[in-house]
Image: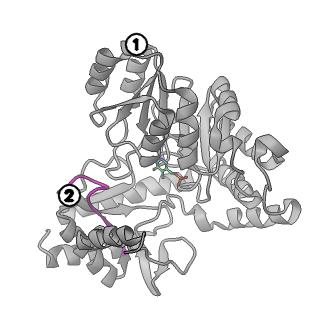
Amino acid sequence: MSKTDWIQQEIDNLQAQGLYNRIRTIGSPQGAWLIVDGKRVLNFCSNNYLGLANHPDIVNAARKSVDTMGMGPAAVRSIAGTMTLHVELEKRLAAFKGVEAAITFQSGFTANLATIPALVGKEDVIFSDKLNHASIIDGARLSGAKIIPYEHNDVNSLEEQIKTNLSQYRRALIVTDGVFSMDGDIAPLPAIYEVAQKYDILLMVDDAHGEGVLGKGGRGIVDHFGLHGKVDVEVGTMSKAFGVVGGVVAGKAIIIEWLRQRGRPFLFSSAVTVPDAAACLAAIDLLEDSTQLVDKLWSNAKYFKEEMVKLGFNTGVSQTPITPIMLGEAKLAQQFSRELFEEGVFAMAIGYPTVAQGKARIRVMISAAHSKDDLDKGLEAFGKVGKKLGVI
Ligand SMILES: *Cc1c(COP(=O)(O)O)cnc(C)c1O
């Protein structure tokens, strides 16, 4: 017996249940097509919504910044000073999103870990959508506050929970994903805001999949619903549509100021590197210059979804470019994904526990980087595999 035997047993269990995570290796830049495990395939997997991950303007901005400012920030910002690039990025993000202020973090994940414990603690309560992202759940746990889940996107359930529980706590926070990444549906933010107002509760939305996607020119879910100045905290990421890396919290100046004092991943961990920050700035330039990429993303998504429905597939409740192809059993979804790969299409199966039992699916991520020809190739492969496996 060795002291790591239990880990081997756990891994064997995962493999037996078909839940072991085998990670494919990508040998090319991100784009509509990828080299995956040595094979050229159509990419239906990435969060590279606008094709910015390998955009020449962004690559050039990163390269130039290294020549003048070097590579790493070399220390935590609050201890050894912050670089002009990071300050500029926060100003530009605040202006882009039309909020008073913004603060950046290493990732969207750490943005949530920073924000929730800074706003609520042991004597407080968090009302959290049942399908919220793992980083929200972890941030909520870290805060020590009581976590009360409400039914997914169900404002009545939210209000019921508030009525029953609010009076037992000092302060409260309502938190929801903006776009839910597995189904592509959008949180009913105007109705959630009404409830937050009625009970005077802080409102936080994690717009990781809405940043660069929803709203005018990709300004996010708050812009999409015209709720400017009403949502207290907007979390976002620069790792998805922005094509780079980094998290952001945008909102009221007083909250951003507090996160500079109390956001632990800000106080105890270094910032993103110089080229990351420069690349994010270049992404904002592109988004502010033109809505063309965002428009292309949405027209691609509309076309792909319509054609999939015509073929006879069920694309669930998606309202965004995230397109789930509902298949039911995890084994079927996995086989479907393997067959697609044989046909030159890279699209991953998603099953329990990421989604509920019996709700396994293939998730297609549409991008502005796809041409109509790419989408047609994908549709053809889906049609062929769907017929072979008796799905359509
Ligand atoms: C992807 C995602 C994150 C994490 O963002 P990273 O920048 O990759 O850490 C956080 N929240 C939600 C809702 C996400 O979809």
**Which residue extends farthest left?**
390
Q: In this view, does 226 lie to the left or right of 158?
A: right
Which of disc 1 and disc 2 is earlier in sequence? 1
Q: Residue at x 84, y 45 (%)?
A: 80
Give the numbered dot on residue 314.
2
Label 1: few (<14), some (14–19) or many (≥20) C-alpha neighbours in 10 Å? few
Q: Where is residue 348 in the image (x, y as percent from the top left)?
A: 34, 68
Mark 2–mark 1 distance (CA, rounded to whole Å): 38 Å
From the top left corner, tell me how far across and down residue 46 is, in percent: 46, 64
Farthest-out residue, front? 1
Q: Where is residue 92 in the image (x, y as percent from the top left)?
A: 71, 41
**Picture residue at 37% right of the left edge, 46% below the top:** 180
Query: In which quarter of the view is residue 113 placed?
Result: top right
Q: Which secondary structure is most common in the magenta stretch?
A: loop
Q: What stretch is highlighted in magenta?
A: 346-359
Asked if disc 2 is less than 8 Å from ligand 1, the answer is: no
| Res 392 → quadrant | bottom left
Q: Do the residues labelled 2 and 1 touch (CB within 8 Å)?
A: no
Q: Does the magenta stretch include residue 147?
A: no
Is the residue 26 above or below the residue 106 in the image? below
Secondary structure beneath label 1: helix
- Residue at the spot of label 1: 198
Looking at the image, is 33 positioned above or below residue 330? below
